[in-house]
Image (spheres, helix red, strand yellow):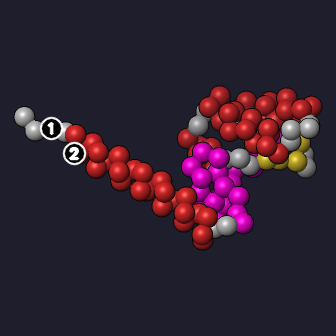
């Protein structure tokens, strides 16, 4: 019976190389662009999904592709991270944004 260890190690190596390639590529060729909090694609590669929580204010921690694949419950951690990084001194806005995420806006 053949061992699957070489195959598994090869797959892990390819996954690590791909991840490193994406990070280096984004840093070198897409610097200055924001990126999706889930897949890390920059906004010049994929469209952001804007979640409007007020008539004139929105946020976009996820790209359209990732947003569409996630449920409101699984989206919330990405929005929470965005809030902690971008609005740490405005906790009064968090319920508005959480409500917009829950509604799937």
- Specify the quadrant of the image occupied by residue 45: bottom right
At 21% from the left and 45% from the top, the residue drawn is: 6
Q: Position of residue 33 (x, y in %)?
A: 70, 63
- Please say whether residue 52 is visible from this viewpoint: no
Q: Residue 65 location, x and y as percent?
A: 58, 50
Residue 8: x percent and y percent? 27, 42
Question: Under tag 2, what secondary structure?
Answer: helix
Q: Which mark is residue 24?
A: none
Secondary structure at numbered mark 1: loop
Query: Residue at the location (15% across, 38% down)?
Result: 3
In the picture, measured across the screen, residue 42 lies left or right of residue 82, that is left
- x then y, percent, for residue 93: 89, 35
The quadrant the N terminus occupies is: top left
Look at the image and tell me in which quarter the C terminus lies: top right
For the point 57% across and 49% down, the residue is: 39
Say which mark, if any, is on residue 6: 2
Q: Main secondary structure of the magenta part?
A: loop
Name the side, left or right, on which 20 lies relative to 3: right
Q: Residues within 10 Å of mark 1 (few under 14, many from 20)?
A: few
Q: Residue furthest left?
A: 1
19 or 105: which is nearer to us? 19
- Mark 1 touches mark 2? (CB < 8 Å): yes
15 vs 80, nearest the viewer: 15
Query: Is 23 within the magenta?
Result: no
> Quarter-wise, where is residue 18 in the image?
bottom left
The answer for how far apart the CA atoms under marks 1 and 2 are is 7 Å
Q: Which residues are magenta?
A: 32-53
**Does the segment drawn in magenta span residue 40?**
yes
On the image, which quarter does residue 100 sit in? top right
Query: What residue is pinned by disc 1?
Result: 3
């Amino acid at each position: 019976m053949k061992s699957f260890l070489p195959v598994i190690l090869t797959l892990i190596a390819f996954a690590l190389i791909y991840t490193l390639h994406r990070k280096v590529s984004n840093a070198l060729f897409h610097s200055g662009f924001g990126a999706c909090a889930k897949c890390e694609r920059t906004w010049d590669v994929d469209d952001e999904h804007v979640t409007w929580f007020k008539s004139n204010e929105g946020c976009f921690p996820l790209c359209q592709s990732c947003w569409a694949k996630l449920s409101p419950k699984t989206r919330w951690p990405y929005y929470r991270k965005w809030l902690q990084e971008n609005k740490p001194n405005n906790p009064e806005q968090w319920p508005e944004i959480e409500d917009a995420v829950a509604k799937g806006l």
